[in-house]
Amino acid sequence: MTHAHLAALKGGLIVSCQAYPAEPMRHPETMTQIAEAAVRGGAVGIRAQGLDDIRLIHERVALPQIGLWKDGDDDVFITPTLEHALAVIAAGAEIVAIDGTRRARPDGLSLAETIDRIHEQTTALVMADVGSVADGIAAYAAGADCVGTTLCGYTGERTKTDGPDLEVLRILAAVLPIPVIAEGRVHTPTQASACIDSGAFAVVVGTAITHPTTITTWFAESVAR
Ligand SMILES: CC(=O)N[C@H](C=O)[C@@H](O)[C@H](O)[C@H](O)COP(=O)(O)O
């Protein structure tokens, strides 16, 4: 049985609204406006980073929100500890995205301990951001409510493909009984559609919708002679 907030995402597009440190658009109001614009285009959910952004988006956007807190320069930086996860949930995220890899976590808790404590202390769901098939299987065993292919190509286990890692997506969607969300380098509508055809429960698009600097480089490079 899928929780209502996850069920609301089924078969849809989740738009990741994130700006990176020191970037011009890094402001909760700006990210909230981007999220509001994404709603008008048909997004069924929003993914957002940082407590202030999550709080404001929760106030103004009536869609399920996947929240995360990127912190630290270590390998594990997506909502790296239980404390980060609880803060993301307190800020209003219905689903908390956490590092769901098999790497050691900075607070010394295992992934299973982290997920157990989130489930004991809150009603939020956990999206485990994984970097490989082995990660995904371990995250399911650890109690994740859903997994995302978010970290495929970023942990050294998988080659960073130009588009989404459809191979990991296809395998995890076939073997796991929980939703598998496609995320990472989905840059075109055709790729998003291929994710659904490969078994994705939902598709997250960030950069190609919400990161104008990167999109500008794609066009600038294509006109350069
Ligand atoms: C690896 C990592 O840090 N991923 C982050 C996770 O939230 C974001 O920087 C990405 O923008 C997000 O995953 C969406 O992916 P893309 O922007 O490729 O559509």
Image (cartoon, rainbow, N blue to C red):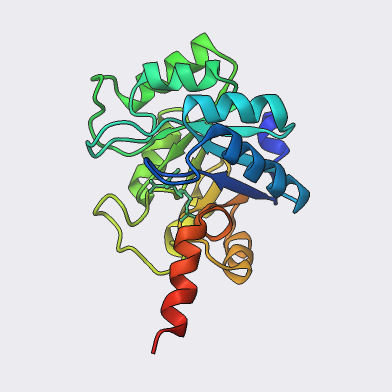
Left or right of 67 in this view: 156: left
Left or right of 87 in this view: 73: left
Q: Nearer the viewer, residue 139 or 194?
A: 194
Against 61, residue 82 (above or below) is: above
Asked whether residue 201 is in view, the answer is no
Q: Nearer the viewer, residue 174 or 224?
A: 224
Percent x, y of residue 140: 45, 36
Q: Residue at x 51, y 55 (%)?
A: 211
Q: Residue furthest front?
A: 24
Left or right of 25 in this view: 133: left
Asked whether residue 198 is in view, the answer is yes
Q: Nearer the viewer, residue 170 or 49?
A: 49
Percent x, y of residue 24: 46, 46
Percent x, y of residue 212: 52, 58
| Occupied quadrant, residue 2 | top right
Q: Residue at x 37, y 42 (%)?
A: 22
- Looking at the rendered image, the quarter that the C terminus falls into is bottom left
Q: Residue furthest bottom?
A: 225
Q: Nearer the viewer, residue 186 or 10?
A: 186
Q: Residue furthest top?
A: 121
